[in-house]
């Protein structure tokens, strides 16, 4: 299976996600992705053959700009995105400052930040280029997202947080075909 083509086809069929991608592109950021559940949930919905996507809790825009670490810039982007696509709750985080919260060495780029997220299928992102093509990033490959496996990130394991997020987010109830893969 060509996972990029399959994921692209899902995005093409989702008007809201396309609007979100276009809104993010309009900010003119250099290194950015819409990540985590934006892509992960869409794939899980398709694998469960849901007739329409499950509602998004939020849309995570991550970007990397080590020349501007002000939280006010993130808030300005939230306001701009909310004006363009008010139907979603926007979360915007500059990955150039997120290492401070997680006690890591400074991240090198947006992909480096994404690669530190808690679950393997969450470590994904997509952005739109100016020609309308999707550019995917997946720390562990998009095949992981299509496998229905829910694994902890082996590079930065946080087992307690992994278990808590599965419970708090209700993923096993929303997508009952998921299989939690416990390390070791």
Image (cartoon, rainbow, N blue to C red):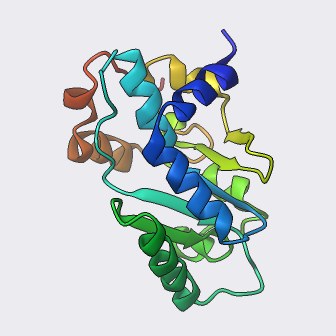
- Disc tally is 0
Picture quarter with the N terminus: top right
Q: Is residue 70 above or below residue 179?
A: below
Q: Is residue 181 left or right of residue 154?
A: left
Q: Is residue 48 above or below residue 94?
A: above
Tell me where residue 23 appears, x and y as whole percent.
Answer: 57, 62
Tell me, yes or no, if residue 167 can be seen here.
yes
Tell me where residue 97 appears, x and y as whole percent.
Answer: 63, 77
Who is closer to the viewer here, 101 or 57? 57
Q: Residue at x 34, y 20 (%)?
A: 178
Q: Residue at x 77, y 86 (%)?
A: 67
Tell me where residue 141 appears, x and y as whole percent.
Answer: 67, 28
Tell me where residue 155 appears, x and y as whole percent.
Answer: 63, 42
The quadrant holding residue 179 is top left
Q: Residue at x 58, y 37 (%)?
A: 154
Who is closer to the viewer here, 100 or 112? 112
Tell me, yes or no, if residue 152 can be seen here.
no
Which residue occupies the extreme top position in the image? Answer: 1
Who is closer to the viewer here, 161 or 94? 94
Q: Residue at x 28, y 34 (%)?
A: 171
Q: Is residue 90 left or right of residue 137?
A: left
Q: Is residue 8 left or right of residue 48?
A: right
The quadrant holding residue 61 is bottom right
Q: Is residue 79 left or right of residue 97?
A: left
Who is closer to the viewer here, 100 or 15? 15
């Amino acid at each position: 299976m060509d996972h990029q083509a399959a994921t692209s086809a899902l995005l093409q069929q989702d008007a809201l996600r396309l609007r979100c991608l276009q809104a993010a592109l309009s900010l003119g950021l250099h290194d950015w992705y819409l990540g985590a559940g934006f892509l992960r949930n869409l794939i899980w919905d398709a694998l469960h053959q849901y007739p329409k996507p499950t509602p998004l809790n939020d849309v995570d825009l991550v970007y990397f700009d080590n020349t501007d670490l002000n939280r006010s810039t993130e808030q300005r982007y939230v306001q701009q995105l909310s004006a363009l696509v008010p139907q979603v709750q926007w979360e915007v985080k500059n990955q150039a400052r997120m290492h401070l919260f997680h006690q890591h060495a400074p991240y090198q780029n947006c992909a480096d930040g994404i690669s530190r997220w808690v679950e393997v299928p969450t470590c994904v992102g997509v952005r739109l280029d100016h020609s309308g093509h999707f550019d995917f990033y997946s720390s562990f490959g998009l095949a992981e997202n299509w496998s229905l496996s829910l694994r902890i990130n082996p590079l930065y394991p946080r087992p307690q947080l992994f278990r808590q997020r599965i419970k708090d987010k209700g993923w096993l109830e929303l997508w009952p075909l998921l299989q939690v893969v416990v390390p070791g």
